[in-house]
Image (tube, helix red, strand yellow):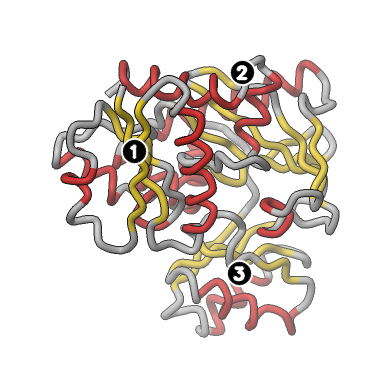
Amino acid sequence: MKVSVVLGGASSEKDISILSGLSVAEALSAKNEANVVHIGEDISTLPEKVFGSDIVFNALHGGFGENGDIQSFFDLHNIHYTGSDAKASKVAMDKHLTKIIAKSEGVPTPNWIMLKTDHYSDSKLLNQATEKFDYPYIVKPANEGSTIGLNVVENEDMLEGALQLAGEFSNEILIEEFIPGRELTVGILGNKALPIVEIIPDDGLYDYDSKYIKGKSEYVVPAEISDKLNRKIQEDALKIYQAIGCRHYARVDFRLNDDEHYLLEINTLPGLTSTSLLPMAANAAGLDFQALVDTIIKIAIVDQ
């Protein structure tokens, strides 16, 4: 097949998108004709760049590549593509909406409040947010990935700076209860949950550097938890994936405090780099990187 791999974009995650896209293109080239398409902010010429392709592998991360915009563009031009459709992408990119759906589905998630940047200086709203949780708590953009713009607020003096940083990336800010404990993630491939990965960051917080710099985090896969808890977390990952309407593949992040797990977010276009978690989980299930990419393509060809 001829597969166009779209990478780059204009989001804060564009550099990771390039790494993901090049890794995907290399894996595809063993069996297919891989056409690498590097885009920036202008996607108007995209149809002619992917003309003649059997399918587009969407390797974009964040921004218009993951929030439903480019998915709508693909649909408008009858372009087949990998990953969730426009509606599911838009919902999943919004952590506030995702958490609302999680609550309605009985999937535990940390308590939270959402603020608009044009209102966050309102003392009443800030009091409502900061009195809702004990220190520390999380301040982060409601629609960014890779923990960009995220801060752990440990005292009142840190709040204003955390709000300003998050506000640089989104006009919607999530203030969320901090859940101590372990960092877990569940890869989804098709409609099957992959082995759970536990992430152990060197610095305690799984931030941007911990995600993408080799040696900054350790990983345990499958995670060392009880079979009962393992099944429950995988079931809840699938439940939120299906409730939102995701397709092909995704990654669902949780915190684990003792035996209580809490949904953090779902990523419809998770990273596919050498340090990425979905390939790690797939490998534990017996799929090397090339097999993972081939499987995504096969699922996407059938499920359009």
Mark 3 = which residue?
129
Left or right position of 47 against 239: left
SS class of the residue under badge 3?
A: helix
Separation of disc 1 and disc 3 at Cα?
48 Å
Report crowding for label 3: few under 14, some 14 to 19, many 20 or more residues within 10 A (C-alpha): many
The mark nearer the N terminus, 2 or 3, is 3
Is residue 178 something that shows in the picture? no
- Check the image and report above or below for 110 versus 165: above
Residues 31 and 258: in front is: 31
- Asked if the residue at tag 2 contacts the one at tag 1, i.e. Cβ–Cβ closer than 8 Å, the answer is no
Name the residue rendered at 66%, 72% in the picture: 130
Residues 47 and 254: in front is: 47
Using the rendered view, name the quadrant where residue 79 is placed.
top left
Whole-percent x, y for residue 250 in the image: 50, 33
- Asked if the residue at tag 3 contacts the one at tag 2, i.e. Cβ–Cβ closer than 8 Å, the answer is no
Using the rendered view, name the quadrant where residue 231 is placed.
top right
The mark nearer the N terminus, 1 or 3, is 1
Left or right position of 133 against 76: right
Query: Can you tell which mark lies on residue 287?
Result: 2
Q: Quadrant of the C terminus?
A: top left
Separation of disc 2 and disc 3 at Cα?
44 Å
Name the residue rendered at 48%, 53% in the picture: 96
The mark nearer the N terminus, 1 or 2, is 1
Name the residue rendered at 71%, 64% in the picture: 137
| Closer to viewer: mark 1 or mark 3 | 1
Amino acid at the residue labelled 3 = Ala
Mark 1 = which residue?
35
Whole-percent x, y for residue 184 in the image: 72, 37
Amino acid at the residue labelled 2 = Leu
Name the residue rendered at 59%, 68% in the picture: 149
